[in-house]
């Protein structure tokens, strides 16, 4: 039987994708690996199928947004921003929701990339913060852009968009302090999201700046969900000395907290001030509307997509990636009636 690309890969001890790169002269294969593949091709007398090779050589204009996020408003804004930039640059968009905790998440992503011949990936948390996923993509030479929470860019040539959740959380907490609050609770989302850690650290830094000792009973672990806010209201407002203010890790939690507080007879903001984060519809549709940090998710998505497309163009032109400058966003404090006692 004639040799196949699979038998060449097995002979050389590499992946089929690596053999494909060698056949198509992509220029991204290490010299020693290149020699192994070339030797295997010669030994097996492998002759690539011309039609398949012509198809593989065509430039692909498909990007994929890979995400695992229960917040529908965030996902919709991300999709709209990515799609707008894709259309502006002649790319199509493939949406790939997934379960980041699945044991098969890496094969799932790899299969999607290869079957759809995706040119690059847009990754948001928690996938953008998972070292094993990133390493697998790097090993396959797959280009991607990450949306990350933090102040310092990671040590990589691949593009990223950084959201300074720390500074925004500091501003929210300091606003609550200037409104006269000292017992300020914090309700966290999932801790596999680095944004949770950054927002909590900003909260703690603001307390520390103003000499306020953080009470462990006012720190609640949860998920980025309405239900976490409702359950947190029950536990926090049943304390002998309940908080006078709550900073929730996102607007959905804050809206649940507002609902739970109302159920227990607390007036907002008279008895309890509540702030969220992200400026999602949850913050605008409650009564009173929620103080929050306005996060321009669609703009973040457009910037991430633009950076990815720029990297793909550089790689097409030079055969390698050049260091990409990170893009920074700082969510801005947006004060509404839920934290203003004079409202």
Image (cartoon, rainbow, N blue to C red):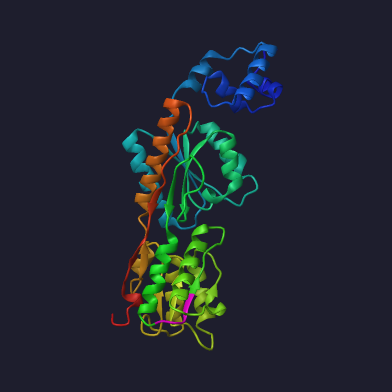
Using the rendered image of the protein, determine whether residue 335 is visible from the camera's viewpoint: yes
Q: Residue at x 42, y 68 (%)?
A: 170
Q: How many marks?
A: 0
Q: Main secondary structure of the magenta part?
A: loop
Q: Residue at x 56, y 69 (%)?
A: 221
Check residue 182 for magenta coloring: yes
Closer to us: 152 or 242 = 152
Q: Nearer the viewer, residue 312 or 260?
A: 312
Instruction: Determine the residue located farthest toward the bottom in the rendered image.
Output: 240
Given residues 63 and 40, the one toward you in this image is 40
Point 43% across, 70% down: residue: 254
Would you place residue 87 above or below residue 150 in this image?
Answer: above
Location of residue 53 in the rendering, given as x and y in whole percent from the top left corner: 52, 18
Direction from residue 159 to residue 109 in the image, left or right: right
Query: Quick check: can you spot residue 275?
Result: no
Q: Please provide percent x and percent y for residue 290.
A: 36, 71
- What residue is at 61 percent from the left and 52 percent from the top? 101
Q: Nearer the viewer, residue 328 or 99?
A: 328
Q: Quadrant of the N terminus?
A: top right
Q: Quadrant of residue 136?
A: top right
Give the image location of residue 35, x and y in percent.
64, 19
| Image spot of residue 196 (x, y percent) | 51, 62
The magenta segment: 181-185
In which quadrant is the C terminus drawn? bottom left
Which quarter of the figure has residue 307? top left
Is 270 contained in the magenta span? no
């Amino acid at each position: 039987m004639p040799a196949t690309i699979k038998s060449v890969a097995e002979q050389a001890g590499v992946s089929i994708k690596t053999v494909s790169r060698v056949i198509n002269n992509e220029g991204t294969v290490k010299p020693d690996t290149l020699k192994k593949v070339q030797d295997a091709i010669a030994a097996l007398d492998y002759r690539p199928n011309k039609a398949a090779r012509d198809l593989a050589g065509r430039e692909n204009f498909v990007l994929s947004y890979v995400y695992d996020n229960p917040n529908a408003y965030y996902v919709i804004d991300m999709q709209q921003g990515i799609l707008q930039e894709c259309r502006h640059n002649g790319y199509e968009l493939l949406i790939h929701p997934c379960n980041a905790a699945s044991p098969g998440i890496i094969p799932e992503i790899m299969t999607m990339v290869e079957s759809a011949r995706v040119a690059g990936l847009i990754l948001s948390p928690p996938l953008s913060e998972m070292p094993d996923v990133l390493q697998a993509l790097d090993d396959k030479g797959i280009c991607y852009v990450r949306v990350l929470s933090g102040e310092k860019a990671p040590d990589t040539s691949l593009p990223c968009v950084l959201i300074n959740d720390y500074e925004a959380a500091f501003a929210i907490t300091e606003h609550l302090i200037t409104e006269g609050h000292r017992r300020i609770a914090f309700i966290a989302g999932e801790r596999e999201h680095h944004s949770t850690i950054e927002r909590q650290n900003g909260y703690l830094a603001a307390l520390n700046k103003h000499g306020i000792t953080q009470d462990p009973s006012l720190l609640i672990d949860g998920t980025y969900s309405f239900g976490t806010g409702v359950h947190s209201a029950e536990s926090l407002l049943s304390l002998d000395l309940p908080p006078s203010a709550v900073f929730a890790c996102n607007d959905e939690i804050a809206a649940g907290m507002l609902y739970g507080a109302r159920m227990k007879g607390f007036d907002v903001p008279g008895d309890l001030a509540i702030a969220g984060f992200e400026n999602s519809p949850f913050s605008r549709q409650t009564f009173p509307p929620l103080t929050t940090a306005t996060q321009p998710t669609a703009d973040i998505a457009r910037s991430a997509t633009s950076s990815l497309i720029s990297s793909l163009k550089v790689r097409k032109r030079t055969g390698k990636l050049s260091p990409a400058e990170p893009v920074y966003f700082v969510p801005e404090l947006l004060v509404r009636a839920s934290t203003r006692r004079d409202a």
